[in-house]
Image (cartoon, helix red, strand yellow):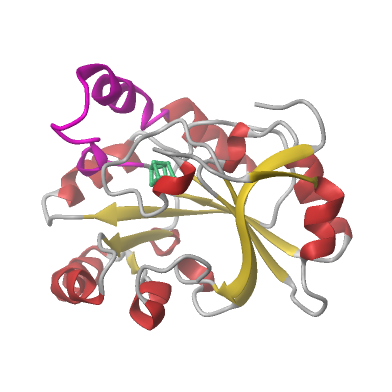
Amino acid sequence: MSSDDRLRIAETFASLQGEGGLSGVPSFFIRTTGCNLRCEWCDTPYTSWEPEGEWQRVDELVEAVPSGMRHVVVTGGEPMLWSSLPALTAALRARGCHVTIETAGTIYQDLTCDLMSVSPKLSNSDPGPARSASVREDHRTSRIDRDVLRRLIDGFFCQLKFVVAEPSDLGEIEAVLAELPAVAPATVMLMPLGTTREELAARGPWLAALCRERGFRFSPRLHIELWGDRRGT
Ligand code: SF4
């Protein structure tokens, strides 16, 4: 998107990491805006369907990290869209930060980070019948890129996070995993779809049972459970 040292940023905030293996860890979030996918249930539509945000330089973003805050999460949207992302993650690590990148895993960049948190999108993310055929087709053909996923798994310390809507999604997850380099089951995390406590409570028990049965890790959505679907959390 850009070849200079700026990124378009939807928001920055300090909170607790809500998902994945670092759930509960105090973290500073840098949320880029813009995404190449269009998931129907996107919980940050202000970074995808209707992207908004201001341009910020890498040095401004690094300076915005509160002193004493070690963990920084660069999320989106799709942060891998930004050509200035490698400069940002390198500068954050030079400052001593632990850097997580949260990506859907459809774009590769040569960069440095401590954790690549990859969330491949399943067919349950289809933009929905109210959207145009071309939007749905673009999403369908680009939501999984096996070559990019292989490069990310081979090149980074990764966790794989899948958003699960129905028990039948498990078959799709296992089909995707079968085409990728072997990963430890404990680095594969299943997360219930939901932006309300009620949705998470409805899906949590059967998803937890499936994780126990298949050896996958259950990921909460701690920020939703604590604060609901609110920006800046
Ligand atoms: S990949 Fe993430 S940011 Fe992009 S549309 Fe899907 S849920 Fe939203």
- In the figure, 37 relative to 166: above or below? above
- In the figure, 220 relative to 226: above or below? above
Position of 48 with respect to 174 (left or right) is right
- In the figure, 154 relative to 208: above or below? above
At a point 47% along the width and 65% down the height, the residue shown is: 231
Image spot of residue 134 (x, y percent): 27, 17
Image spot of residue 20 (x, y percent): 46, 66
Quarter of the figure that contains the N terminus: top right
- In the figure, 178 relative to 224: above or below? above
Q: Nearer the viewer, residue 226 or 215?
A: 226
At a point 44% along the width and 57% down the height, the residue shown is: 184
Q: How many marks?
A: 0
State the extent of the magenta-drawn residues as a range.
121-145
Q: Nearer the viewer, residue 215 or 219?
A: 219
Position of 95 with respect to 203 (left or right) is right
Position of 65 with respect to 43 (left or right) is right
Query: Image quadrant of residue 205?
Result: bottom left
Query: Image quadrant of residue 70?
Result: bottom right
At a point 20% along the width and 19% down the height, the residue shown is: 133
Q: Nearer the viewer, residue 171 or 104?
A: 104
Residue 216 inside the magenta-drawn segment: no
At a point 19% along the width and 67% down the height, the residue shown is: 207
Quarter of the displayed picture in which ligand 1 can be seen: top left
Image spot of residue 81 (x, y percent): 60, 33
Position of 24 with respect to 212 (left or right) is right
Image spot of residue 181 (x, y percent): 45, 39
Q: Nearer the viewer, residue 228 or 19?
A: 228
